[in-house]
Amino acid sequence: MPDQTLKAAAARYTQRTAKTSAQNPARSRQEQAWSFYRTPEVRSFANWISNAMSSARLYAGRLGPGDSIIKAPDNHPAARIVSEIAGGRDGQSQLMREYGRHLAVAGEGWTVIRPREGAPPTWHVVSVLEMTSKGKGMEAQIDGAPVAIPPGADEGTEDKANSLDPVAIRVWDPSPERHLEADSPVLASLNELEELRLLGAAVRAVTLSRLIGRGVLVVPKGTRFPSTPVQGSEEDDLIDIFMEVAETAIRDPSSAAATVPIILEVPAEMVGLIQRLTFESNFDELAIKLREENIRRFATAADIPAEFLLGLGDVNHWGVWGLTEEAIRLGIEPRLSVVAHAYTEHWLRPLLESENVPDAEEWSVFADSAPLRVRTNRSETALRLFELGAISSRALRRETGFDEADAPDGEERPNPQRQDQEDDQAPGGTDLPVDQAPREPDTLPAAATPRPTDAALAAADALIWAALSAAGRKLERTPACPRSERARAREVDPAQLHTLLTVEPTQVDQWRLLDGAWSRVPEIATRYGLDPDCLAASLDNYCRELIAAGVVHTFEVVPAAIGSCSRRAAAA
């Protein structure tokens, strides 16, 4: 990045940043929030947010018609500036990962950019506890060393910003009560987390204390106690033994002292007179229940589904997918917007203005959350499409978790099922059915089994394209296509829109993507001598597979998709 542009950005906001937030009135609460980070539930929540945010991708764009987002061309200055944030995609992934923790715990973090002579600047994310006010400027602790951040020269200071001066950007989720203060689920749960800490300490103390504070053992006079070689009263010996056993049990819970009772020798008539007086209450069990309740309250306060903190044991894979979608929408995308907005106001636009880019105020930083949405059960779908010839062996390896190093050496061995399929599709052959469900035996000899005519294949191809086109137009109005993407979606062939969006198998029915698509199937099946029920089922199954897998339709697959329908008609 040119030195003059970095200087312009520094002059734009370092003074303002130092004035407004280095002495954050909520700093003590943020220190308390960070003290709970090593609480397992808080750490799990913060790391879930950070890991999810690390998959997002930053890009430059501007708002278009209908709240759509128009991505900046690759040669546009805005695209270049955003691509250089944190040194590129890998650095941006780490940057977003770190901001996930900061926004989840303290609701605030800082970006410190340190220019270097003849090299790209370095980007650091530091916590609010590592930023302090120093005179007119600020000081950051980076890797244990103080880094001075001078004020800018645009707000009345006599100092001039140097192109090699570090720059600071404050990124925070503002509190609705006081805008300059940060907000986060952990900040909102400080009382509950303090209770959780106290209850945890109580449960730990109960676990460690085997005898200490657990009551008084009343024995009748004349009882003979175990003795030690050291001179002393028998009562003192008993106390020493109790203390030794208790200390051993605490120091080594696996020792016999933790489980084996202490043996006392008493006359037979006195056995029934020995009593244990306890000062116990139900607090031991109550503390455990209260701790579980506090964990549940924090899970409710966290802005992701509570199941991610409490466990997903009773949730099937479709339920997990739904919860993940909700977590992305409520817990990830709002935080991505916080970071993107800060970089828009304090990085992208100042640099565009310094380069005299027209309409600099129109360009913004956006975060693409599409990589977070992973289709479920893609391996099985990919295998079926490979058998149909709809995807390549390379795509099959990718979707099933293998790479090109796992490919066969030399000439790739043909897939036996595909080879049989290709042989059957040769003139005079019989197409294998797509539907593998049990069906009536085919009593006709292979040579007598008719192949769908070219006209029938063309008609089926037209039905498929019409169904996918109608489904694509419906997809534009579903949550799978965010409002920000609908302008771009309208530029895509509706029959291929499913290849760009994430659609789960259950959502085909949920959004009624194929409703009414097969109304003309009986007419066409009768016209070309095909089984109507088989044709409708085969086309419907095939289109569902394509939509869920995000694969484009090709005519070459049609014979395999409807071949069984010709056989059934012949058998009838």
Image (tube, rainbow, N blue to C red):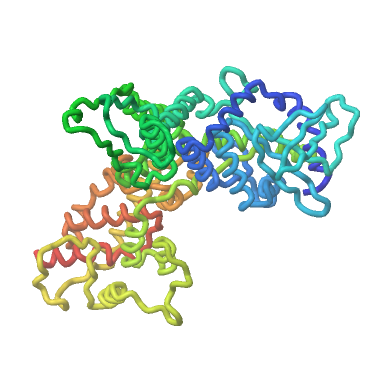
State the image coordinates of residue 385 (x, y, percent, origin top left): 34, 62
Q: Can you tell which quarter of the image residue 24 is in?
A: top right
| Residue 67 in sight from this viewpoint | no
Q: Residue furthest bottom?
A: 410
Q: Is residue 395 above or below residue 284?
A: below
User: Residue at point 69% right, 44% down?
Assistant: 124
Q: Can you tell which quarter of the image residue 513 is in?
A: top left
State the image coordinates of residue 337 (x, y, percent, origin top left): 57, 35
Q: Residue furthest right?
A: 158
State the image coordinates of residue 466 (x, y, percent, origin top left): 34, 51
- Horizontal relation, residue 135 to residue 373: left or right: right
Q: Is residue 300 above or below residue 385?
A: above
Q: Is residue 116 above or below residue 184?
A: below
User: Residue at point 53% right, 32% down?
Assistant: 36
User: Residue at point 57% right, 42% down?
Assistant: 367
Q: Can you tell which quarter of the image residue 248 is in?
A: top left
Residue in the foreground of this view, choosing between 395 and 144: 144
